[in-house]
Image: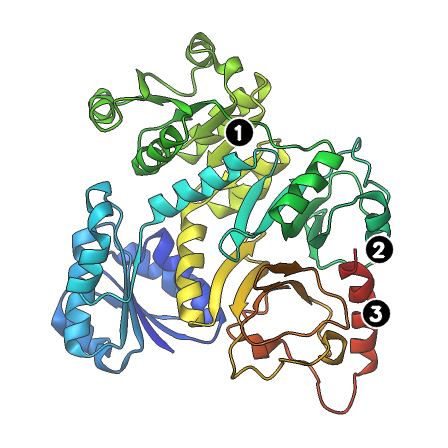
Amino acid sequence: MYIIIVGAGKVGLALAENLSKNNHNITIIDKNNNALQKAEDNLEVMCMRGNGVSANILLKAGVEKSDLLIAVTNSDEVNMVACLTAKKLGVKSTIARIRDPEYAHELSLLKEELDLDLVINPELAVADEIANILNFSTAINAESFAKGRVKMIEIRVTEEMPIVGIKLKDLAYKSSSRILIGVGVRNDEVFVPNGDFIIKNNDLIYILGKSSDVYKFCKYNGKSPQKIRNVMIIGGGRITIYLAKILMELDIKVMIIEKDIDKCIELSELLPRALIINGDGTDEDLLKSENLMDMDAFIAMTGMDEENFMSSLLAKQNGVKKVIAKISRTNYINIIKNLGIDSVISPKLTTTTLILKYIRGNNVESLYRIIEGQAEIVEFNVDSSSKITNIKLKKLGLPKDIIIATIVRKNEIVIPHGNDVIKEGDKIIIISNNKNLSSLDDIIFNIAGGESSESKVSLKDTGNFIGM
């Protein structure tokens, strides 16, 4: 695809990096020379200095022959006008980032009137992501698939958990729940484990299954989710506004600490049921005076990564069980996780994932990128055009780094074995090690002529693994 990105900020550069790796032709438009120079120095993209709402600039960029224009500047209005202008000039599809809470209830109208193909609200998406994590408080990250019927959670293995030292293929004898451990991280190495994989202390593991089975697995391992009743949030930005509204609808008490007095006044008007405190969220004395130790969860969401990091450490050291930090610089994420912060949220990564899902096409129902994009969990709808229906899974010749994790069929949720088949109308959840799958048929390795020796090993191992 030929894609034009208007805006060379953090999100624009992250998108350009991911899309160029997938062999898309990218042109970035921005008025900032420094931002464009950074893109030219680090990415294989074309850069053009100018205003993304200018018809002249867009025509010079070749908008009339482009497949997609993505507007992700810091201005919602600029993004909307850039998309509208591009559509008038002949671009096939447009995506606009629209962030202001005042537009939140008008997005469907704006989408229709401006002929937008997709509207992205990163702050709202991040608020939903945090709410999901709080709903399953023992998880580092949590995501739902198949309209909530399948749950994926990320947890860190600790030495007191009974699964430590157990092979995956023997796990069924230790736990009554039907789950799949689909991805693991050990010493910063990402892998799709097979049945002989032995779980060790401090591993990060990604668990999929029916929500009730995932809950039972966590309970067996002493990781039962705890009810969240009181939340302290540092920073009063847009994410905080969206999140506070979600949490208060769930009868969760919300306290917000914000430095800017004018912002505090605005928050008190927008969120009359929340307790608003004017103060410094990195001040330990202030946090303690506001009963930090009695909080069920602490969320740091200022505009400064360093402040979020410091306040999160203070919360963790003072015994808060669930601590979440918003981080913009993705190279900080692993460092912060390794220092004991429970969950790290990146609006840039969330936005990038939403846009990549759209670009993959209509067959992709859900896309969740894990471990900073090193692996993916993708949900596909199976239609009549698929080439892999009614074929036993063991005959598909799956590569070692792809697993069919779950089949959702009407009222049934299946952790599949090699003899199971995919049928039209199913929803299929696949784990892949950065394969950038856009079609269910992309997983085919070798159907005709029998399996290669490599695929036989893969299927044997995977059969042990997914038969838990």
Q: Which mark is residue 169?
A: 2
Three-letter amino acid code at disc 2?
Lys
Q: Quadrant of the N terminus?
A: bottom left
Is 367 located above or below residue 1 in the figure? above
Residue in the foreground of this view, choosing between 81 and 389: 389
The answer to whether residue 457 is above or below residue 180 is below
The C terminus sits in image quarter: bottom right
Residue 460 position within the rendered picture, expressed as x and y whole percent measured from the top left: 83, 69
**Left/right of residue 266 with respect to residue 257 in the rendered view:** left
Give the number of the disc on residue 460: 3
Residue at screen point 23% across, 53% down: 107
The percent position of residue 391, horizontal first and vertical second, equals 69, 81
Res. 323 mark: 1
Q: Mark 3 or 1, which is nearer the eye? A: 3
Q: Nearer the viewer, residue 436 or 398?
A: 398
Choose between 75 and 143: the one closer to the eye: 143
Q: Disc 3 marks which amino acid?
A: Lys
Colouring mode (rainbow / by chain / secondary structure / one colour): rainbow
Q: Is residue 141 visible?
A: yes
> Element at badge 2?
helix
Q: Dot 1: few (<14), some (14–19), or many (≥20) neighbours within 10 Å?
A: many
Query: Which label's residue is closer to the chain start, 2 or 3?
Result: 2
Which numbered disc, 3 or 1, marks the residue that appears first in the sequence? 1
